[in-house]
């Protein structure tokens, strides 16, 4: 593993939201071992001239579907290809994401739990790509949202079994399954009604209690207010999409420490995709967009924790990754550039529970860093147009 020495580089401090000018940063054995204004002692480290450059922590995406290809109909493609091709596609998307600066993703739904095993294969050194926090297959009810990426569970007993099955995959993959995903409501990308909550509060509490007992966290796909309210009452850890959230519910989210993963850009894309995707998708997405504009504004005003997630792989969304477009929409809807960068780095790491190792340029953290030719706090586009090098644990990827 290479030792790296970044000389006279500007460090993007996502904790304080500022720039540490003209710093020297040493990465040894994949870990950030020194950060200082003055020269650092180093043994056989590769020196990288950072003068005029910016060193930023790798970007994270809290909501992806690595097995989907972003085509107009990724669901049908995924079903037709089966789990073996799905795993290879997930690997390809994870590698492409890493090349473009996305160093961590949380995969929130796949067929036959393949991303759990892909993450395990990466840990064993059999392949490579961005780090994956896998949820495995989501949990959905009969006639619920995207059953092809899910396991079906309706009663409390079935829900407990589903949670325990996901936990039990640790024994097969020897990889800690930290998160699970529940489809708490219908969605825009499915033919089902977005409408009522798919699960009762009692059902959702059963999922949360069992998952938390097993030291797992729960993310919930939830669009309408009724389903979101039930998720908040049940103590879900992250609300995905969260289109229609009342101010009292946002206040309760903040009080309970529940994070919002808004996935704004995908609904704008779907709303503008009439004639490309099924008409019900664009019709439902247009309503979601209007709701999200209000909810996002109110969430910012109430100080709700917001972490970046995209729904990468979804219909007509194009190739992975999609984080940069999401950044632009978050900024368009009222989040300042500093907070956008934080949402994709240290905030995401804290929500995921990996901030001890990821999310910022600090001593003892993994050397997952990006070398940019501009200040991302001033211009978010530098992640796309000014990305010069990507490092994962000190190894040059791109």
Image: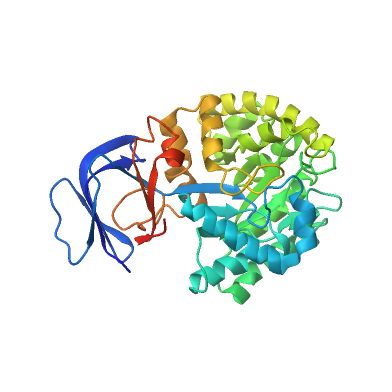
Q: Position of residue 84 (x, y in %)?
A: 70, 69
Q: Position of residue 135 (x, y in %)?
A: 63, 58
**Quarter-of-image position of residue 221:** top right
In the image, taking residue 370 as reference, residue 94 lies left or right, namely right
Residue 124 seen from this side: yes
In the image, taking residue 110 as reference, residue 310 lies left or right, namely left
Q: Quadrant of the N terminus?
A: bottom left
Total number of numbered discs in the rendering: 0
Q: Position of residue 98 (x, y in %)?
A: 48, 55
Q: Is residue 30 above or below residue 295?
A: below
In the image, taking residue 129 as reference, residue 83 lies left or right, namely right
Q: Is residue 66 above or below residue 172?
A: above
Look at 64% across and 61% down and name the residue there.
89
Residue 151 seen from this side: no
Q: Position of residue 177 (x, y in %)?
A: 58, 63
**Quarter-of-image position of residue 224:** top right
Q: Nearer the viewer, residue 310 or 137?
A: 310
Q: Nearer the viewer, residue 80 or 361?
A: 80
């Amino acid at each position: 593993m290479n030792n790296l020495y970044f000389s006279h580089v500007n460090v993007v401090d996502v904790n304080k939201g500022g720039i540490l000018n003209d710093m020297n940063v040493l990465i040894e054995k994949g870990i950030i071992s020194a950060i200082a204004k003055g020269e650092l002692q180093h043994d056989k480290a590769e020196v990288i001239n950072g003068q005029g450059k910016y060193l930023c922590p790798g970007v994270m995406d809290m909501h992806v579907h690595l097995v989907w290809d972003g085509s107009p109909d990724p669901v049908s493609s995924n079903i037709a290809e089966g789990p073996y091709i799905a795993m290879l596609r997930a690997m390809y998307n994870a590698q492409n994401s890493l090349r473009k600066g996305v160093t961590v993703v949380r995969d929130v739904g796949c067929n036959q739990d393949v991303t759990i095993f892909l993450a395990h294969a990466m840990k064993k050194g059999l392949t490579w790509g961005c780090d994956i926090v896998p949820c495995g297959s989501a949990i959905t009810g009969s006639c619920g949202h995207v059953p092809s990426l899910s396991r079906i569970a309706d009663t409390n007993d079935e829900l407990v079994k589903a949670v325990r099955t996901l936990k039990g995959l640790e024994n097969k993959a020897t990889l800690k399954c930290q998160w699970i995903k529940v489809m708490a409501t219908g969605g825009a990308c499915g033919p089902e009604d977005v409408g009522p909550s798919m699960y009762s509060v009692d059902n959702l509490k059963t999922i949360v209690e069992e998952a938390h007992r097993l030291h797992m966290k729960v993310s919930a796909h939830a669009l309408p207010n009724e389903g979101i309210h039930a998720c908040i009452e049940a103590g879900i850890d992250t609300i995905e999409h969260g289109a229609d959230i009342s101010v009292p519910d946002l206040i309760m989210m903040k009080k309970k420490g529940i994070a919002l993963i808004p996935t704004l850009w995908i609904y704008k894309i779907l709303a503008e995709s009439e004639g490309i995707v099924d008409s019900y998708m664009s019709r439902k997405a247009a309503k979601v967009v209007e709701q999200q504009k209000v909810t996002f504004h109110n969430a910012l005003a109430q100080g709700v924790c917001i972490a970046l997630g995209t729904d990468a792989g979804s219909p007509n969304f194009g190739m992975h990754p999609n984080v940069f477009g999401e950044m632009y929409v978050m900024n368009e809807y009222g989040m300042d550039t500093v907070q956008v960068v934080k949402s994709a780095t240290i905030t995401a790491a804290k929500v995921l529970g990996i901030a001890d190792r990821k999310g910022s340029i600090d001593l003892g953290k993994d050397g997952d860093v990006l070398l940019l030719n501009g200040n991302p706090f001033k211009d978010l586009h530098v992640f796309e147009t000014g990305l010069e090098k990507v490092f994962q644990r000190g190894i040059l990827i791109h």
